[in-house]
Image: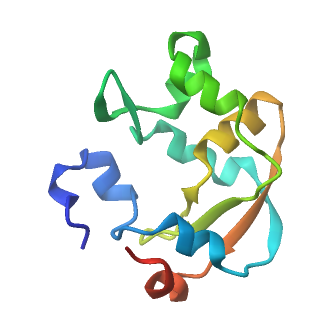
């Protein structure tokens, strides 16, 4: 179980991953790229994954997508996101595809009206390889 699990908002406790991962270990995996419908990933944009006003876990990416100019830091990250890299996803403990890395890329791709995105679907069997 995550070290800070009890400190996370209820929505993330119920829907987020139950482990920490190292992005460098994640990026080092040799996983094929495939296309996925945005509709399979958009659900998590309603979860407060992002920080705002120096507070963690208090901003849903969908709020930023709805009014991007209110959030200049995230706007910059979104507009500068390198969408040539696939989004890393994994099935979470509830059986939903969840983003490990690439929420800002997803939002940018949605702003560009993409209905499909490039992903690397990391198998749950790789958790021990990417755990932090």
Q: Position of residue 82 (x, y in %)?
A: 75, 44
List the single residue furthest toward the left.
Answer: 6
Q: Quadrant location of residue 74?
A: top right
**In the depicted view, which residue is nearer to us: 93 or 132?**
132
Residue ID at (33%, 21%): 53
**Does 101 sit above or below residue 19?**
above
Left or right? Give the position of 92 relative to 58.
right
Residue ID at (47%, 37%): 46
Q: Position of residue 22 (x, y in %)?
A: 46, 68
Quarter of the image with the C terminus in it: bottom left
Q: Quadrant location of residue 76?
A: top right
Quarter of the image with the N terminus in it: bottom left
Q: Quadrant location of residue 115?
A: top right
**Does 27 sit above or below residue 46?**
below
Left or right? Give the position of 52 relative to 41.
left
**In the depicted view, which residue is nearer to us: 77 or 47?**
77
Residue ID at (28%, 56%): 13
Left or right? Give the position of 111 relative to 24.
right
């Amino acid at each position: 179980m995550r070290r800070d699990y009890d400190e996370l908002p209820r929505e993330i406790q119920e829907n987020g991953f139950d482990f920490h991962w190292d992005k460098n270990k994640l990026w080092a995996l040799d996983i094929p790229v495939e296309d996925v419908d945005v509709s399979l990933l958009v659900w998590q944009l309603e979860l407060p994954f992002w920080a705002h006003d120096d507070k963690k876990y208090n901003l849903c990416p969908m709020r930023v997508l709805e009014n991007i100019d209110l959030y200049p830091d995230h706007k910059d990250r979104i507009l500068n996101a390198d969408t040539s890299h696939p989004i890393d996803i994994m099935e979470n403990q509830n059986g939903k595809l969840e983003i490990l890395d690439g929420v800002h890329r997803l939002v940018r791709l949605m702003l560009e009206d993409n209905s499909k995105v490039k992903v690397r679907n990391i198998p749950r069997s790789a958790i021990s390889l990417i755990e932090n």
